[in-house]
Image (cartoon, rainbow, N blue to C red):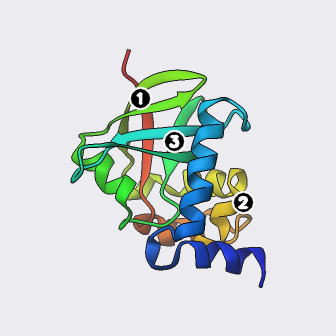
Amino acid sequence: MTQGDLLRWMYRGQRPNWLARILNRAGATMASLSVTPNYMVTLEVTGRKSGRVVSLPMVVTVIDGQRYLVSMLGENVRWVQNVRAAGGRAAFRRGGREEVCLEEVPADQRAPILKAYLRRAPGARPHVPVDKDAPIVEFEKIAVAFPVFRVVNNS
């Protein structure tokens, strides 16, 4: 079994299995404590059904000083649905807490962000059907399927 096969198995059906949940919990804790690389954060968003704060580790992609989050599993994932239901209100934890607003990027503007994201997040590569070094036109073909959010400070 390759690493890509393992990562796809961990998120079959666009949902984390038991192992992915454990690793996500550990990753979120480590990102909150600033133990991970500086492009890792813990995203906190209110669950649209439970009302509880949901935390998960995320890779932040930076382009021209602007920060972005990408859904490596596409549209039908809970954190994307929760962010939309919360009107974009969320928080990052990395050492401290940063209140942010996540604004969805239109599909026709996502391709360069997706390409930069795949270069930064090797764990996402098995979930995105384009090679990280593919021409931008290949990312344009899949951009509608992978939500991207621009991070705006709430200060």
Task: Give the Cα distance between marks 1 and 3.
Answer: 9 Å
Q: Secondary structure at mark 1?
A: strand
Three-letter residue code for mark 3: Tyr
**Upstream in the sequence, badge 3 or badge 2?**
3
Question: In this picture, is 134 found above or below 100?
Answer: below
Mark 2 vs mark 1: give the one in front. Answer: 2
Q: Which residue is mark 3?
A: 68
Q: Residue sitting at 70 percent across and 32 percent down? A: 38
Q: Which residue is mark 2?
A: 122
Three-letter residue code for mark 2: Pro
Question: In this picture, is 39 found above or below 74?
Answer: above
Q: Where is residue 44 shown, x and y percent of the image? A: 42, 38
Q: Residue sitting at 69 percent across and 81 percent down? A: 5
Residue 21 badge: none
Q: Secondary structure at mark 2?
A: helix
The mark total stands at: 3
Disc 1 packing (10 Å; few <14; some 14–19; many ≥20): some
Residue placed most toward the observer, 3 or 106: 3
Task: Give the Cα distance between marks 2 and 1.
Answer: 25 Å
> Which quadrant of the structure image shows residue 108?
bottom left
Query: Quick check: 49 left or right of 8?
Result: left
- Judged from this view, the residue extending furthest toward the bottom is 1
Question: In this picture, is 143 found above or below 25?
Answer: below
Q: Which residue is mark 1?
A: 152
**Upstream in the sequence, badge 1 or badge 3?**
3
Query: Quick check: 85 left or right of 79?
Result: left
Query: Quick check: 106 left or right of 30?
Result: left
Q: Where is residue 42 shown, x and y percent of the image? A: 53, 39
**Can residue 130 be seen in this snapshot?**
no
**Can residue 3 be seen in this snapshot?**
yes
Cβ atoms at labels 3 and 2 below 8 Å apart: no
Disc 2 packing (10 Å; few <14; some 14–19; many ≥20): few
